[in-house]
Image: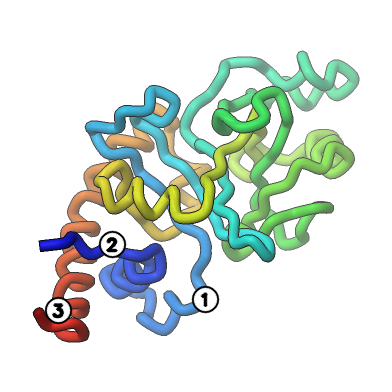
Amino acid sequence: MRRRFISWGALMAALWLCSAPLRAADAEGASSVLLIAAEGMADPRFRQSVVLVTRHGSSNATVGVIVNRSLGVPLDRLFPELKQAAEHHLHYGGPVAEGRVVFLVRSTEAPAAAIAMAEQLFLSSDGGSLRRLLATPTPVKRLRVFSGFASWAPDQLEHEIDRGDWYLLPVDADALFGEALDDMWPRLWRRATQLMVQARTRVVRHRDRAYPL
């Protein structure tokens, strides 16, 4: 029997159906999600990682950042003129364009050149905006800075999810900024494994009703 491919849309819909108190209708416009690496993740760049991703642009490209991997480099080494930058550290955002600085910020106002990842949560690579945020200063619980980012070719991430490389969770900004980095993956992995069992069960039931053998 040929295995049916579970699409991103179907997984997202089932995920939100299982994620009280969100409503099923909320899934329709959802484009951002947390990827939680499975225990058997083969790619060493993503082992025990939590990745915030979204669909972006006319090509519907999938882009995001690994949110739980600090490089231990204080930002005043990158911005020596900003003493407040010493409170922040550089994080590994992913294997694409390593060395390019991007940042994630919780704010009521979007920085320049921002991608909206969730409500009041933005990803940007605009250097001027980052300098202003560091100079303000913006607290660590609202700003995280990365070197590099992650991206996937069309359908690549869907295949990885279908293969079992990733679990999915709704975006939780409180967890992203409030959770200790070392604790983030194991805690969210436990939550995601329980949730995805429910989500896949619902997808299969819906599929079998829609496409009986």
Q: Which residue is mark 3?
A: 208
Q: Which residue is mark 1?
A: 29
Give the residue displayed 69% in from the left and 40% down from the top: 103
| Residue type of the residue flagged with mark 3 | Asp
Say what secondary structure mark 2 lies in: loop
User: Who is closer to the viewer here, 45 or 83?
Assistant: 45
- Mark in front: 1 vs 2: 2
Which quadrant of the rendered structure holds the C terminus? Answer: bottom left
Total numbered circles? 3
Q: CA distance from mark 1 to mark 3?
A: 24 Å
Q: Secondary structure at mark 1?
A: loop
- 112 lies left or right of 55: right
Q: Which residue is mark 2?
A: 5
Give the mark toward the camera: 1 or 3.
Answer: 3
Tell me which amino acid carries mark 1: Gly
N-term mark: 1 or 3: 1
**Label 3 packing within 10 angstroms: few (<14), some (14-19), many (20+):** few
Question: Please, what secondary structure does the residue beneath circle 3 have?
Answer: helix
Residue extending farthest front: 1
Q: Residues within 10 Å of mark 1 (few under 14, many from 20)?
A: few
What is the quadrant of the N terminus in the image?
bottom left
Give the Cα separation between the discs numbered 1 and 2: 21 Å
